[in-house]
Amino acid sequence: MDLRVVAADAASPAPEPLMRALLGETLRSVRQRQGRTLKEVSTDAGVSMTYLSEVERGQKEASSEVIAAITRALGGSLIDLLAEMSGQLVGADTTVASGADRAATLAVA
């Protein structure tokens, strides 16, 4: 398998965002909408402020336990977080297929 990076031409679709980047952007957006600081949320979640900052910037891949703790600290659930992330993905992709088309695409992959 050849894993060399090949320059994309203008017709190539944009790469999908990394999950950790999308997660971080979503967590930061929710926190800022609530008017809360990194310190407040990190204390409530039981993680360091530095670690939360790295998660928000997409530099760290948080465990599911940490993601759940941060989400609870923000007053939400994992379902809320995933719905928000899904909305960001759909908003970024104007060519999103219908639910049935997406399911068929996933089944093929």
Image: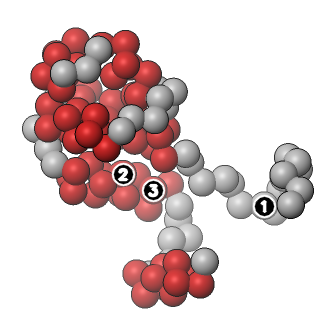
The CA span between labels 3 and 1 is 18 Å
Name the residue type under label 2: Met
Q: Label 2 near label 1: C-beta < 8 Å?
A: no
Name the residue type under label 1: Ser
**Residue 56: x percent and y percent?**
40, 28
- Answer few, some or many: residues within 10 Å of disc 3's Cα (few below 14, many 20 plus, some between 14 and 19): some
Q: Which residue is mark 1?
A: 12
Q: In the displayed structure, does residue 27 sit left or right of residue 33?
A: right
**Residue 37: x percent and y percent?**
22, 16
Task: Return the disc, 1 or 2, that comes first in the chain's sequence.
Answer: 1
* Element type where label 1 sits in the image: loop
The CA span between labels 3 and 2 is 6 Å
Task: Return the disc, 3 or 1, that comes first in the chain's sequence.
Answer: 1
Residue 89: assigned label? 3
The residue lying toward the viewer, choosing from 27 and 67, is 67
- Answer few, some or many: residues within 10 Å of disc 2's Cα (few below 14, many 20 plus, some between 14 and 19): some
Q: Label 2 near label 3: C-beta < 8 Å?
A: yes
* Element type where label 2 sits in the image: helix
Q: Which residue is mark 2?
A: 85
Q: Residue at x 14, y 38 (%)?
A: 72
Q: Quadrant of residue 99?
A: bottom left
